[in-house]
Image (spheres, rainbow, N blue to C red):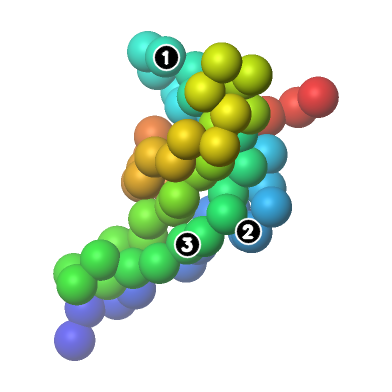
Amino acid sequence: MHERPPFKFGLRAKVEKRRGYKWPGVVVSRFRTLAGKPRYVVECIVPEVRGALHIFSDVQLKSRQE
């Protein structure tokens, strides 16, 4: 059986992408792939695309300080 890595971010955590476009937002859901890897649904807070959702792995995200 494969070891399941823990979730690094909780629901409502404020995050953004580490590289490329920033995608500042809030974690609105989290789940595991069939392989057991953590994934996060992040809702963007930028006014032009507010409410848009993207799915990221934990290595793509970092905590965002306000």
The reply to whether discs 2 and 1 touch (Cβ–Cβ < 8 Å) is no
Q: Quadrant of residue 45?
A: top right
- Regarding mark 2 in the picture, which secondary structure is present there? loop
User: On the rendered structure, is 63 left or right of 55?
Assistant: right
Q: Quadrant of residue 47?
A: top right
Mark closer to the chain start, 1 or 3: 1
- Amino acid carrying label 1: it is Tyr
- Regarding mark 3 in the picture, which secondary structure is present there? strand
Q: Name the foreground residue: 58 vs 43.
A: 43
Task: Residue 50 in the image: state x and y as whole percent.
Answer: 58, 29
Mark closer to the chain start, 2 or 3: 2
Q: Residue at x 68, y 39 (%)?
A: 14
Query: What is the quadrant of the N terminus in the image?
Result: bottom left
- Amino acid carrying label 3: it is Arg
Residue 65's place in the image compared with 19, above or below, is: below
Q: Quadrant of residue 25?
A: top right
Q: Name the foreground residue: 42 vs 47.
A: 47
Task: Residue 62 in the image: state x and y as whole percent.
Answer: 55, 33
Residue 10's place in the image compared with 14, above or below, is: below
- Amino acid carrying label 2: it is Gly
- Dot label at residue 21: 1
The reply to whether discs 2 and 3 touch (Cβ–Cβ < 8 Å) is yes
- Regarding mark 1 in the picture, which secondary structure is present there? loop
What is the spatial separation of the Cα atoms under label 2 and label 3, in whole angstroms? 8 Å
What is the spatial separation of the Cα atoms under label 1 and label 3, in whole angstroms? 21 Å
Q: Residue at x 36, y 45 (%)?
A: 55
Mark 3, residue position: 30
Mark closer to the chain start, 2 or 1: 2
Mark 2, residue position: 10
What is the spatial separation of the Cα atoms under label 2 and label 1, in whole angstroms? 22 Å
How crowded pointer 2 is (Cα within 10 Å; few <14, some 14-19, many 20+) is rated as few
